[in-house]
Amino acid sequence: MSKPQVGIIMGSQSDLPVMSEAADILEELGVTIEVTVVSAHRTPHRMVEYAEKAASRDLKVIIAGAGGAAHLPGMVASLTTLPVIGVPVKSRNSIDGWDSVLSILQMPGGIPVATVALDGAKNAGILAAEIIGAFDQKIGKNLQDYKESLKEKVLESAKSMEENGWRGNKIGFKK
Ligand code: RP5
């Protein structure tokens, strides 16, 4: 099996339904991944070890998701020079998700976390693929094809709406 290029970590197994969307799109785009649970609060030493060893294990990007007081992405970013993409998760201990969004978004200068939307793990996966695709032609080509397929879907719905009228076309855009 080839080495993982992207590490997907999350604060709890309860984040998996959201975070699996990052895994799914990365696999679709041909990026190799590893997926595990690393909790900033409940396994702080594991978090330090994971973040400190990530670059030497040849990971290229880390996607970190957490809910509530979401310290995992920022703390991992403080311990590595790899790009870290943060996914705020609307968990059951969240206040509408804002706590998680702001914990991940409002990083101090010098320690960036590329924060996606609440539960935006799919975009985190695409962003990670884009970072890798900037240097890897095959992944870059897969991303081009993916974006082309999004365009085709929009054009198909526009055509259907124009030909059949909007009243029969109330089904939302399927990504
Ligand atoms: C965070 O607390 C986790 O990332 C999760 O989103 C949330 C709830 O965790 P569990 O109580 O479900 O393990 O640390």
Image (tube, rainbow, N blue to C red):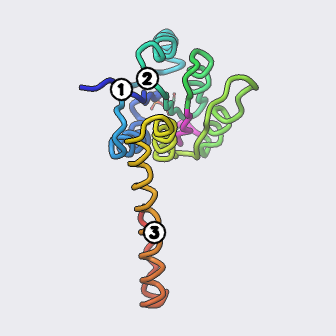
The secondary structure type at the circle numbered 2 is loop
117 to the left or right of 157: right
Q: CA distance from mark 2 to mark 3?
A: 34 Å
Q: Earlier in the sequence, mark 2 or mark 1?
A: 1
Mark 2: amino acid: Leu
The residue depicted at 52 percent of the width and 46 percent of the height is 120
Q: Is residue 110 toward the left or the right of residue 53 in the image?
A: right
Apparent side of residue 29 relative to residue 55 in the rendered image (left or right): left
Rate crowding at label 3 as few (under 14), some (14 to 19) or many (20 or more) other CA atoms within 10 Å.
few
Q: Along the line of sight, which residue is nearer the eye, 55 or 43?
A: 55
Magenta region, residue range = 85-94
For discs 2 and 3, the disc positioned in front in the rendered view:
2
Residue type at tag 1 = Pro
On the rendered image, what quadrant is the C terminus found in?
A: bottom left
Q: Few, some or many C-alpha atoms within 10 Å of disc 1 (few <14, some 14-19, many ≥20)? A: some
Q: Is residue 49 visible?
A: yes
Q: Which residue is mark 3?
A: 173
Disc number for residue 4: 1
Cα separation, mark 2 vs mark 1, equals: 6 Å
Picture coordinates of residue 95 (x, y %)? 62, 41
- Which residue, given by chain and number where applicable, does mark 2 sit on? 59
Asked if labels 1 and 2 touch by Cβ distance under 8 angstroms, the answer is yes
Give the mark count.
Answer: 3
